[in-house]
Amino acid sequence: MRNITFIIFFSIVLIIYSLINYYIFIRGWKAIPVDSAIRPFYRWGFLFLASSYIIARILERIWLSPVSDIFAWVGSFWLGFMFYFFLAVVFFDILRLLHLAFPVYPWFMPSDPAKFRFAVFVITCISVSLIMLAGFVNALSPRVKTINLSIQKNAGNRQELSVAMASDIHMGTLVGPRRTKKMANLINSLKPDMVVFAGDMVDEELAPVLRFDLGRELKRISAPLGVYAVTGNHEYIGGADKAKKYLEDHGVTMLNDTMLLIDSSFYLAGREDRTSTRFGHKKRKDLGELLNGADLNKPVIMLDHQPFGLSEVAQSGADLQISGHTHHGQLWPLNYLTRAIYEVSAGLKKIGKTWFYVSPGYGGWGPPVRTNSRPEVVLFRISFANSGS
């Protein structure tokens, strides 16, 4: 049944992907003059670009190699180009329809419509390329974001706590040794008391992580109170049990619907990702089960990859929930969509007595590009009620 569901889902995605690419291709084909020498290059180049991501996904399962890396990089970049080309084509098609009723651009349209179409084609290609280049540079430039919080609970002898956090690293072919090393260096430079990862550490398949030995960078991360993580949807898509074991073997304590009392001062609880039911065939614990037995007079920090059900968390007694998953849309204007879906798409919000922080993430899914947010490592500086604040 699971295989049938996957085949149906993949078929629907493939059909939609093909239709979008065909739509873009046809609009570009019509914009290029019939007698232009560019046409043959455009046809075969477009076919190569549009098929690269699919070829990469197949090769990564049967022949992980530099060849599969090339297709993965080309295909992933094409996803971003495809997205912005699609927006551009839709925009110009709407403009053309409007022009049928209301002349909207006769004042700058040249007398030769063919030249005008080709000029728009060239300008669009250049504009999208510049957007993608800027987004790629941005994706390679993580920042450290410091957040100061006060939790009005007694944490024993501990007056304050520093927690370094990253989410959505998506370690694999695109987020390889260099970016993983940079993340580890950033975290260690902060000298935190504790490190947490809010899911999607692995980008689905574990094979590229093993091939590049990315776990060696995780082993370098150190904190007196430990390094902890929860699963995300991508761990479950690629096989959560394998990912969990790999992370555990490389110095990361996985919180699998578990709660720990840290330093006799505060609780750290970690929830399985919501997709555990669909991909792992097991229902995750509800909040009552997870926090059962906790002394809620002590601070409670919660890790949950997907920021859903915030009101329920606020009523549970948790003081801070850290999440990721949204990427804050990753590509503008998808951030408007994530804002519509999630109560918090990115940033900090307080509901009742509970703080919520949703990170746009360190890595990314699909194109290695960010056009509306910086990748980040977050440092929480938390003061407790017994600090005199």
Image (cartoon, helix red, strand yellow):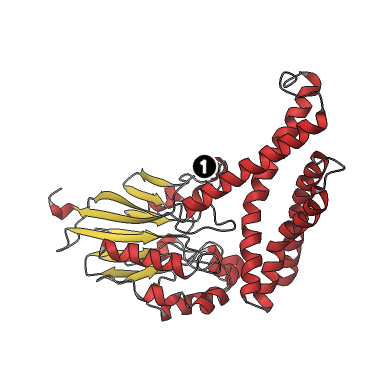
The percent coordinates of residue 142 (x first, y second) are: 41, 55
Observer-nearest of 111 and 292? 111
User: Does residue 291 appear in the picture of this structure?
Assistant: no
Query: Quick one: which residue is furthest to the right in this view?
Result: 35
Report the side of 204 relative to 293 (left or right). Answer: right
Reply above or below: 277 against 38.
below
Question: Residue at 42% of width from left, 52% of height from top?
Answer: 359
Q: Position of residue 232 (x, y in %)?
A: 50, 64
The image quarter in which residue 181 lies:
bottom left
Q: Amino acid at mark 1?
A: Arg
Q: Which residue is labeled 1 in the image?
A: 339
Query: Tag 1: Cα neighbours inside 10 Å, few (<14), some, or many (≥20)?
Result: some
Nearer to us in this view, 249 or 123: 123
Q: Residue at x 49, y 52 (%)?
A: 137
Along the horizontal axis of the image, is 184 left or right of 124? left
Q: Is residue 152 left or right of residue 234?
A: left
Q: Residue at x 57, y 41 (%)?
A: 333
Question: Quarter holding the N terminus?
Answer: bottom right
- The relative height of residue 177 versus residue 38 in the rendered view (above or below) is below
The vertical placement of 282 against 38, above or below, is below
| For residue 107, side relative to residue 302 (left or right) | right
Q: Nearer the viewer, residue 21 or 159?
A: 21
